[in-house]
Image: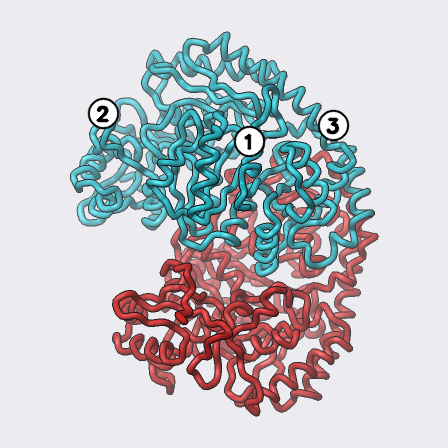
Chain colours: A cyan, B red
Amino acid sequence: MGMTTSTRRPQAAATTALLAVVVDRAAPETLGRQLYLRIRELILAGRLAAGERLPSTRRLAEDLGVSRTVPLAAYDQLAAEGYIDARRGSGQYVRALDGTVRPTARRAAPAPAAAQEPLAPALRGQPFDPDAAAAALFPAREWARMMARGWRRDGAAAIGPDQWSGLRSLRAAIAGHVRALQGLDVTAEQVAVTAGVGDALQLIARALVPRGAEVWVEDPGHIGARHALAREGLRVVPVPVDAEGIDVAAGRWLAPHARLALVTPQRQFPSGAPLSLPRRIALIDWARQAGAVVVADDYDSELRFSGRPMAALSSLDPGQAVLSVGSFSKLTFPGLRLGYVVGPQALIARLAQARAREGAPVAMGAQPAMAEFISGGGFARHLRALRRQMGQRRQALAAALAARLGEAVAILPQDVGMHLTIALREGAAGGMSDVEVAALGAARGLNLDPLSSHGAASPAPQGFLLGYAGWDEQRLAAGVETLARLLADCARGAVRLRPCVDAQAAG
Amino acid sequence: MGMTTSTRRPQAAATTALLAVVVDRAAPETLGRQLYLRIRELILAGRLAAGERLPSTRRLAEDLGVSRTVPLAAYDQLAAEGYIDARRGSGQYVRALDGTVRPTARRAAPAPAAAQEPLAPALRGQPFDPDAAAAALFPAREWARMMARGWRRDGAAAIGPDQWSGLRSLRAAIAGHVRALQGLDVTAEQVAVTAGVGDALQLIARALVPRGAEVWVEDPGHIGARHALAREGLRVVPVPVDAEGIDVAAGRWLAPHARLALVTPQRQFPSGAPLSLPRRIALIDWARQAGAVVVADDYDSELRFSGRPMAALSSLDPGQAVLSVGSFSKLTFPGLRLGYVVGPQALIARLAQARAREGAPVAMGAQPAMAEFISGGGFARHLRALRRQMGQRRQALAAALAARLGEAVAILPQDVGMHLTIALREGAAGGMSDVEVAALGAARGLNLDPLSSHGAASPAPQGFLLGYAGWDEQRLAAGVETLARLLADCARGAVRLRPCVDAQAAG
């Protein structure tokens, strides 16, 4: 049976996904094989969906700057293994496979339904979902009181017009929070309330960056942030990251005239390394020359367990071009949807002007309560409790990993946050990729976030981001046990990806 | 002095704006003049910004399906009048003009700073801003009590996970509201809470429409909705509107395989005409054949002053493909940011799946309170008060217009809502376009929304959307007086657009 789906999605989506593919002439594998591997990963990760048309070999060769034999070889291999359906004259399409077909590849077959997006809905909230928040710890009754008090006090302002930078009392409260966190002298005028980091990035893009301009993002880095910037019509340039953080020299070479750089200076996402001082200086220098804005996302910095944070990036910024973004939703509950941008007053004013032009303020519902929660000390109390509990969970997870998977994985060093990043040692999954292991994990109730899915470059580092915020110590240990068995099964070739996993897709 | 700006924006933005241009071979004016007029309007409206590069004449000719002499003639005229800067070999750029240059055109010159976006922030809240809400009527104290009560009752659910369709109690309350409004039997499972109509459209686009697919929008129609769909990667096809609403036959001809149609069946925006029954049937028929989703935006239907509404479009829908969208923000206060999608349960479930994949629920802050406000009857009471006051303001505005501008404008018939649409009679502004009059009005503190800015086709109808929600009867009468003097000054050639209006841009 022909197994291509009936919906033909246009070529644009596939082209966009493939734009992120990089082939490396210095790598030991042939360019054709590199391309084959990258496209296969995109298919397995669901980033190229069933029915999508791939770019022509001619076009792909042009985009990658390689000879046409390279995509021809890659497509031939993908077609031979059943990942794509190549028909002369009419193009190549990603295949959808069902139970009646077996791929001809020896090892892996796509599981399109379950892996279609970063996360199947049914697995949200399962270990080790890094987006799970510690909502169970959140003081619900105190929050309800904050809602009542905040709206009594600030209701007139909250209902009124011109709240383009957010509720004044919340801006003042956030300024105090950031002063305490980063040791910077910040006033309410330097704060804009946002609906979270994604909203902040999109607002910054619309207000401060010319449409179509290039922007630096870390590679590997946060895939959601990359998408948020791309959605605003910016040309995202992945800049490699090493042990010192983003490689500024590489960025200057790849996109010297970029207009924005998004970095995670306190703790690079997902590697965990802080941005070194020489790199910070180089980054600020470049930004000044290029007239670029630097956006620092010190995510999870409220949850530092040990060591001292480096001074905020903006403390090095004589040119007034550094903005810090942050979110409160992961620290409270998922429906809060509040965050902030902090930076020079002139830039914050331009953000407000953009909001005013668009006519859509940030939802006001929780702003009065959050202002009360922060300024009354409730938020700081909650963070202390959260830090204590997160520290315990983090230790429990690290201990279970060391005991059960010490041979197979390495825990990357990090002292902040709500997840651990582990790297798979060579052969730990019997040659399966982290994306493939994650697809198998889904069948066992594990939500595994593959490290390689955060990178645009090839070869991608192999491993997982393991969130621990949402589960107690027993649950985390059980999750590690499941992961250990899964990896052992992979290593001895006892499991294979099955073509269709409808049971999960239905969840 | 050379007055092009130093920032060269890429060609993509200009190309996108020009894609909406249509030339009409049956029109009395030459194609070259039509094109010149449309591009000039885009520049005056700020939709082509200073420094933007225009497509080459060859490319534009291809896109429009005309001979290359057509864009050549248009560009020559625009260059002669100082709107664009044409340099041999390097392309054509939109000019920025400042106080030191006067355009060579006799009548109009662009005012880029003030007109750069639909609305200069300083004029938000000035008459006759159609987006102004009647927040002054909103019962702030009652709302603060609803906040306290709602969070006491529903706090645990609101903080909890998996609120992808919104808070259960709010979904149930909205179902009741829609039942009362549209006479349809709707259950909570058929409701998804959204952050407003824009959010609803984007969610529907992502969840139900293949990326890159064509979608029908009304022309003229809501420009914000058009942008929302285009931002999701859909190809927006403007379908002409006549006295019966959207021209389904034209839509079938322009884009037979579109996957979504966005319509305003109760009262077409901005013309005010309801979608006729034959058209409704034709629309539903087409949607069934094409496998398309129909999205009905019965905006402002809570504010009907007279007449009976037609049955909801979905009552004609045996194929379960009609979704209704609505917003509460304009009926309450701008920071509420809550709205809904109502439709077949299977489609609503797919919307929830998309939210879950994206991991971002609608902000929860106001949901418990809105549930209380609706289900406790407070919202209905507020709507009655609002309808009474809006009716008075509408009458006051209509009376002032008739008394002062009866010769110059015609009020389009409509019996719902928070704005009146007026058409400029021939010569009422001395040959100036509505966009030009609006730019002049800004200097006199008037926020005029030009009717032609809602249309993609040429020739655009000339007139204004006059909101009346935000001002009392004296203020509205004073606004009409200002408008009348402005039009009179335009008609006798006593005013001209000045090249630069920095004073307003700084506001």
Query: Where residue A47 appears, x then y in whole percent?
Result: 38, 38
In x, y percent, where is residue A433? Answer: 35, 23
What residue is at 51 percent from the left and 81 percent from the top?
A: B433
In the foreground, B169 or A469: A469
**Subunit ID for the residue under disc 2:** A
Which tag, 2 or 1, sits closer to the chain's start?
A: 2
Question: What amino acid is found at the position of numbered circle 3 in the picture?
Answer: Arg
Image location of residue B295, percent across then percent down: 53, 58
Question: Which residue is denoted by mark 3 in the rendering?
Answer: A381
Q: Amino acid at mark 2?
A: Pro
- Residue B379 x, y percent position in the rendering: 76, 56
Q: Disc 3 versus disc 1: distance between alpha carbons? A: 22 Å
Q: Residue at x 66, y 30 (%)?
A: A135
Between label 3 and label 1, give the one nearer the viewer.
3
**Looking at the rendered structure, which numbered label has been put on residue A28?**
2
The chain under label 3 reads A
**Mark 3 near mark 1, Cβ–Cβ under 8 Å?**
no
